[in-house]
């Protein structure tokens, strides 16, 4: 009965059984792991490996509760995937379990069985070196659990996800997963080099990922972060393809997931998710992996250090990667050109935004002289906006009405050879008064001029915003916010950082803070809610990102109204200047809403469209 109770925590579904058995195989030094399932894993799970095997005298110990050979004298020094000694007895208490194993030096194999908690005697068996664990009729001894199982397809999908998640961390091991529908997942072994690890990631996540990924390699205070993250224009609709590992252990950690969201906050829409594979390596004594029997959650001794490392490393990598377009954009464009193909639409945010064309033609415009953001002095004076080459006043001179060919206009001179060698090449035309067509040595580039300039203006605003203390406005009467004493203490500890963002507060008794200044950019704001949100975030993540995100959102709104409009005719010099600014600005591959600012189509792809290849 004790084992059945423990099984409720350790064995949640068939995928949990597969996870525990595969981890045991890897701890035994296996180089090949084969998994076979039937009925979604409820009827049959068989895991075979070529590891070190279990000696015959130890088979009975292997199914004894809390019996393990993986721990040293120090419980904090855990260097194996398993260590609790609960998996096999828990499985045996709710299913029909048999273990057949042979060591490298053994003359023969031995087998032991356990059915619903009743152990059978050890007996001789025939087997190659390694271990085969077979689980039949999962939860037959606890039929109430069967009512909570999903369909065969859903359970099989969960098992496949578990195998893929583990396989990424062990590229030198060959994994095979076979199901009843004759579908087989094969992940051939690579090697444990950087190239081998990326090859394994490509096996799991698809061949497009390496072409759309940026390498991460950072170190801070004994914590090492490595792996790959996708470029901003390569996203998914959910976070299922975000893989995180701590000392080689697959984990699903809220802190890591939140850090990834924070790092991509500026470049992705809220309903899109980056694709990531991140490996954290640190002293085992500084991380607790024994939070839950399933070992999927971890706790860090210094969570702020880990979060800061992830956010900083990803942002630095995105900034250093320059401007890149997702290869999938070209694939969608190719598909749209084929006869009979459905119109291709890039997966943009489902946030109710109208199209750029409709939204900004109907816009009443942005008046910087009357804006609440004027204290920033972002290049506006009493005489009006300063000239920047793209402002509305400067463009008005070029708005001379339709030309002879409004859908194809550019300078007649041939572009300089140096421009063709740039990432975005040389501007050749402007079509539909919104899209710049550029040429490089081996590709054709189409740029959305409004989306591109919106990102450029946004980055300039952000740089100016964070280069100095944010202007604040003094409240006529201080706002007193009642809080739990621990929240008030946390806010007081971060008061200097908050002051940099224009929020001035101080302790006001044991359970309250007095807010004396608020950021000018926020205008009239709900101070009570803002302070409580900050207190909650500091309690969860030890950061004050909420305030920074609000200020950045205002900067994004200003960028929307201050950027070059769709429908503006641009000279060739202006188009090339926009392209050069994009190349020099980090994150300019996507606009503020996460949509791509340009699509690149290789010359080889164009030639295939015309049957020349």
Image: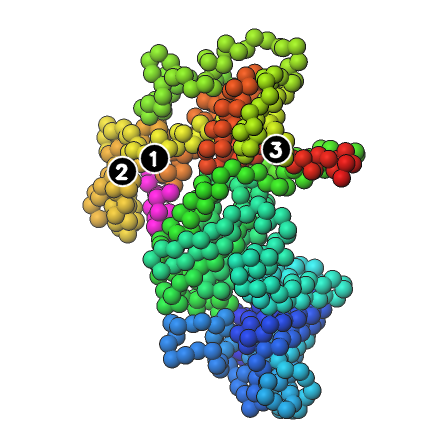
Residue 104 placement: quadrant = bottom right
Q: Earlier in the sequence, mark 2 or mark 1?
A: 1
Compared with 603, 197 (above or below) is below
Crowding at dot 3, Cα within 10 Å, few <14 / some 14-19 / many 20+, comes out as some
Q: Give whichever of 224, 372 is nearer the camera.
A: 224
Q: Earlier in the sequence, mark 2 or mark 3?
A: 3
Pick out the residue farthest to the top: 400
- Residue occupied by mark 2: 499
How far apart marks 3 and 1 lie (CA) works out to 38 Å
Secondary structure found at label 2: helix
Q: Quadrant of the N terminus?
A: bottom right
How far apart marks 2 and 3 lie (CA) works out to 50 Å
Q: Give whichever of 508, 585 is nearer the camera.
A: 585
What residue is rendered at 45% in x and 64% in y? 247
Magenta segment's dominant SS is helix
Where in the figure is residue 258, as x and y percent of width and height?
A: 45, 50
Can you tell which of label 2 and label 3 is closer to the viewer? 3
- Residue occupied by mark 3: 441
What residue is rendered at 65% in x and 64% in y? 188
What residue is rendered at 59% in x and 78% in y? 51
Residue 219 included in the magenta stretch of the image: no
How far apart marks 2 and 1 lie (CA) works out to 12 Å
What residue is rendered at 47% in x and 28% in y? 581
- Residue occupied by mark 1: 466
Span colored in magenta: 527-545
Crowding at dot 1, Cα within 10 Å, few <14 / some 14-19 / many 20+, comes out as some
Crowding at dot 2, Cα within 10 Å, few <14 / some 14-19 / many 20+, comes out as some
Image marks 3 and 1: residues in contact by CB distance under 8 Å: no
As drawn, is 498 to the left or to the right of 323?
left
Where in the figure is residue 194, as x and y percent of width and height?
A: 52, 58
Where in the figure is residue 305, as x and y percent of width and height?
A: 35, 54
Q: Earlier in the sequence, mark 3 or mark 1?
A: 3
């Amino acid at each position: 009965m004790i084992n059945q109770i423990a099984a409720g925590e350790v064995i949640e579904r068939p995928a949990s059984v597969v996870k525990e058995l595969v981890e045991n195989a890897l701890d035994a030094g296996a180089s090949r792991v084969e998994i076979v399932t039937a009925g979604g894993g409820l009827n049959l799970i068989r895991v075979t490996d070529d590891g070190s095997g279990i000696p015959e005298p130890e088979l009975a110990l292997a199914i004894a509760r809390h019996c393990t050979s993986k721990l040293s004298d120090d419980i904090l020094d855990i260097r194996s995937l398993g260590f609790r000694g609960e998996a096999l007895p828990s499985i045996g208490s709710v299913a029909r379990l048999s273990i057949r194993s042979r060591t490298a030096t053994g003359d023969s194999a031995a087998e032991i069985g356990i059915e619903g908690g009743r152990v059978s005697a050890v007996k001789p068996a025939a087997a190659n070196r390694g271990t085969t664990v077979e689980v039949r009729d999962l939860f037959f001894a606890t039929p109430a659990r069967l009512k909570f199982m999903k369909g065969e397809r859903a359970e099989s999908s969960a098992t496949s996800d578990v195998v893929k998640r583990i396989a990424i961390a062990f590229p030198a091991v060959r994994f095979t997963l076979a199901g009843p529908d004759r579908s087989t997942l094969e992940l051939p072994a690579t090697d444990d080099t950087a190239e081998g690890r990326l090859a394994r990631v490509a096996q799991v996540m698809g061949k497009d990922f390496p072409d759309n990924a940026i390498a991460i390699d950072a170190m801070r205070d004994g914590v090492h972060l490595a792996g790959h993250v996708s470029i901003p224009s390569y996203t998914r609709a959910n976070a299922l393809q975000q893989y995180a590992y701590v000392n080689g252990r697959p984990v699903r950690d809220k802190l890591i997931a939140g850090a990834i969201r924070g790092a991509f906050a500026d470049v992705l829409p809220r309903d899109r998710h980056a694709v990531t594979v991140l490996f954290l390596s640190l002293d085992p004594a500084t991380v607790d992996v024994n939070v839950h029997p399933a070992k999927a959650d971890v706790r860090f001794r210094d969570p702020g250090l880990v979060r800061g490392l992830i956010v900083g490393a990803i942002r630095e990598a995105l900034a250093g990667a320059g401007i890149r377009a997702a290869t999938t954009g070209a694939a969608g464009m190719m598909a749209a050109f084929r006869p009979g193909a459905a119109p291709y639409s890039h997966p943009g945010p489902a946030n109710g935004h109208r199209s750029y064309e409709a939204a900004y033609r109907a816009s009443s415009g942005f008046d910087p002289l009357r804006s609440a953001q004027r204290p920033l002095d972002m290049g506006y004076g009493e005489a009006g906006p300063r000239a920047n080459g793209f402002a509305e006043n400067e463009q008005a001179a070029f708005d001379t009405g339709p030309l002879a060919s409004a859908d194809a206009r550019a300078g007649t001179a041939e572009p300089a050879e140096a421009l063709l060698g740039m990432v975005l090449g040389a501007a050749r035309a402007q079509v539909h008064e919104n899209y710049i067509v550029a040429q490089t040595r081996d590709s054709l580039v189409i740029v959305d001029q409004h989306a591109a300039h919106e990102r450029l203006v946004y980055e300039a605003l952000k740089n100016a915003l964070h280069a100095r203390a944010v202007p604040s406005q003094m409240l006529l009467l201080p706002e007193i916010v009642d809080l739990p004493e621990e929240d008030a203490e946390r806010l007081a500890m971060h008061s200097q950082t908050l002051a940099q963002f224009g929020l001035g507060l101080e302790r006001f008794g044991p359970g309250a803070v007095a807010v004396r200044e608020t950021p000018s950019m926020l205008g009239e704001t709900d101070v009570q809610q803002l302070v409580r949100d900050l207190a909650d975030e500091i309690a969860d993540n030890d950061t004050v990102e909420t305030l920074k995100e609000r200020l950045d959102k205002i900067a994004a709104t200003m960028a929307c109204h201050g950027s070059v409009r769709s429908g503006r005719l641009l000279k060739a010099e202006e188009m090339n200047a926009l392209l050069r600014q994009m190349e020099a600005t980090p994150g300019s591959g996507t606009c503020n809403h996460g949509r791509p600012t340009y699509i690149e189509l290789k010359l080889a792809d164009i030639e295939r469209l015309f049957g020349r290849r």
